[in-house]
Image (spheres, rainbow, N blue to C red):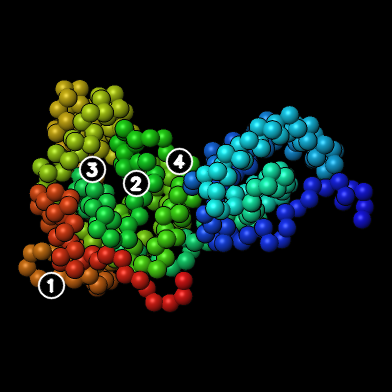
Amino acid sequence: MSGQAKRRMPQPPQQMRLAIETFLGGQGAVVDVRSPGEFRQGHMPGAHNLPLFDDVQRAQVGTTYKHKGRQAAVLEGLALVGPRLESLGQELVRLAALTPAAPLRLHCWRGGMRSESVAWLAQGLDLPVVVLKGGYKAYRHWVLDLFEQPWPLRLLGGRTGSGKTELLLELQARGVAVIDLEGLANHRGSSFGGLGQAEQPSSEHFENLLATALWPLRQAETIWLEDESAQVGRCRIPGGLWRQMQGAPLLAVQRPLEARLDHLVSLYGNQGQAGLAEATQRIARRLGPQRTALALEAIAQDNWHAACRQILDYYDRCYDHGLEGRPALGVVSNGPGPSGGSPGPAGEPPMPWDLGLAPPPEAAEQLLAAGLISPIQQRLGPD
């Protein structure tokens, strides 16, 4: 064995290096030892960031590796980490105590030196530990591959202000398989959708959150999502899932105009004139000069209903246009005619189910009682 090989950090035993789905199925705390900047860009939901290097140090070691080679980079890394070994060890002990019956789950970018080094430290502290084979890079491949798999999607549609998100959450509480895209994106999907919301995740982290929500539903017979645009704010729906959404049967719901206005005022009426005016200006070109002027005038007068009425004209036209050619979920109307939960004829426009003034809990019960939506049922076939 060469002297250089002897000096390399010992790798964790082979049985400690887990493939992605085995790793994700574990119970121990997930410890991401990448730099804070890498972690902010995207990480496994629920992971704890214990960076071996900060962002500057990571760049510094990378530059040394590129220009001076691996040995010089390892020595520089040791010099940077050495003074922090005690604090790193204390943090590993604290994280291990969160799940004392299960080993820590460690990963870095590729399952290389950073995770190996921290695993070595954990072993020295007699802490059980496993390492993700291939690191976060393998996890990202798994996430993106997940969206390319076929999913039994169903979409809930309806004009802006119909309370679709609230309805989906009520259905979820009643055992229906639901993915809340707007909740994951921290955005309600329109020009106004970011008002009053927390900061949006990066598109990368949105994909991670979406995969985490989707994976437990892999045996569901149907999975319900809101009919969204390709982007929810700045978060882009992954291409594989978006293509499936475009072909998924759609159940449209409707509410009276005044009820929709009341709902929008309850969501946005307390967001202040400045934010509402700015969001209106962003769609001024599509609203047209007259409707934009009327909406801005109403906002300046705190007349939220009048402002929303002008803006809804644009969003209603967009929604109606988007329904053209979409597959309907049966002929789903609670007026005269048949109804049901199977896909309707191709190209037939969805007939909306009239929710009237029913609050979301009552509306959810209506859809369940009509058999248009069902609680989770398992698909036959392998896991």
Q: Badge 3 local density, few (<14 within 10 Å), some, or many (20+)?
A: some
Closest to the camera, between mark 1 and mark 2, is: 2
Instruction: Identify the residue position indicated by label 1 in the image.
Output: 338
Q: Could you tell me which residue is drawn at 31 percent across and 39 percent down?
A: 193
Q: Earlier in the sequence, mark 3 or mark 2?
A: 2
Instruction: Give the residue type at disc 1.
Output: Pro
Q: Nearer the viewer, residue 61 or 339?
A: 61
Q: Secondary structure at mark 4?
A: loop
Closest to the camera, between mark 3 and mark 2, is: 2
Report the residue that reaches farthest toward the bottom.
381
Instruction: Give the residue type at disc 2.
Output: Glu
Q: Could you tell me which residue is drawn at 46 percent across and 55 percent down?
A: 211
Instruction: Give the residue type at disc 4.
Output: Pro
Q: Earlier in the sequence, mark 2 or mark 4?
A: 2
Residue 191 lies left or right of residue 352; in this view the side is right
Closest to the camera, between mark 1 and mark 4, is: 4
Instruction: Identify the residue position indicated by label 2 in the image.
Output: 182
